[in-house]
Image (cartoon, helix red, strand yellow):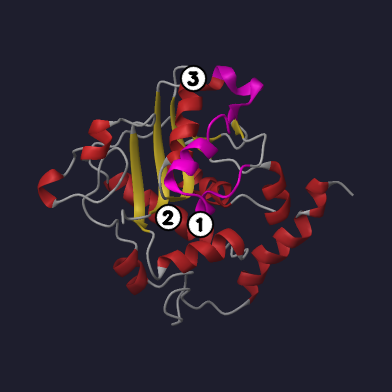
Amino acid sequence: MSQRWSRWPRRALLACGGALLPCACALCGGAAGAPVCAACEGRFAAGGGVRCRCCANPLGEAEAGLACGACLAGAPAYDATVAAADYASPLDQLVLRLKFGGALALAPWCAGALRRAVLAAPGFALPELLCPVPLGPARLVERGYNQALEIARPLSSLLGIALYPRLALRPLDTPAQARLTPGERKKNMRHAFLVAPDMLAVVRGRHIGVVDDVMTSGHTLDALAATLKRFGAARVSNMVFARTPPH
């Protein structure tokens, strides 16, 4: 049996399991008709206030629509970022359940929250196509799915933007970013990505929306944006469910 098909039983069971169980809010445990109840959604996934238009870090009310000092001092390769929420308690546990616990039913809810944030972001231009941040081959086999792709699929339908699941490739497995220092994270992402050879014509001159579950230091998204632009992308905008606040 190929690795591709051996992953399907686990993925299918994980996806179907949630549909067979009574629906309770993943955050408060109360009854809900969705993975997260309306009250928790309004409290924890309402956009997080004013953010830097480039990296989505929080700003003061008077700075709405502006870039933060860090982005002005050293502009990243990406042009804009929209985040639906802060990566903080209790949403961080929800993201971890999606990322490592196979809670795939949470992905469409994350996509819905991200859609609302995208449409509400001042001056944000919708990209022409979507590209999920790819996983390395060994990590994909181990996990059985790519959480960024699981969010990107429903987001593509909600926004009416074409999804290219294999536009970007990650041919080598790099160490997990969470285990590295900020300096090591940037070095770790050098040369991590490629554009698929049959996607070169799709990238050239286009505005690409990169989808991911969490943005922390931004080094992964910066490296992917740099790769896309090196192969001809005109603009790269990040669309992430959660943004880790600066410490």
Looking at the image, which is closer to me, 141 or 25?
141
Callouts 2 and 3 close, C-beta under 8 Å? no
Span colored in magenta? 174-201
Q: The residue under label 2 is which amino acid type?
A: Gly
Question: Which amino acid, mark 3?
Answer: Arg
Q: Position of residue 198 (x, y in %)?
A: 65, 21
Give me the residue at 40% from left, 39% from top.
Answer: 238
Q: Residue furthest left?
A: 62
Q: Position of residue 82 (x, y in %)?
A: 34, 45
Residue under the image location 53 percent in, 76 percent down: 23
Residue type beneath disc 1: Pro
Quadrant in the picture for the C terminus: bottom left
- Real-space Cα distance between discs 2 and 3? 31 Å
Residue in view at x 39 percent, y 29 percent: 77
Q: Is residue 229 left or right of residue 79?
A: right
> Crowdedness of circle 3 by 10 Å Cα count: few (<14), some, many (20+)?
some
Whether label 1 touches label 2, CB < 8 Å: yes
Secondary element under disc 1, as helix, strand or loop, is: helix
On screen, residue 240 versus residue 62, left or right, reads right
Q: Which residue is mark 1?
A: 108
Observer able to see residue 28:
yes
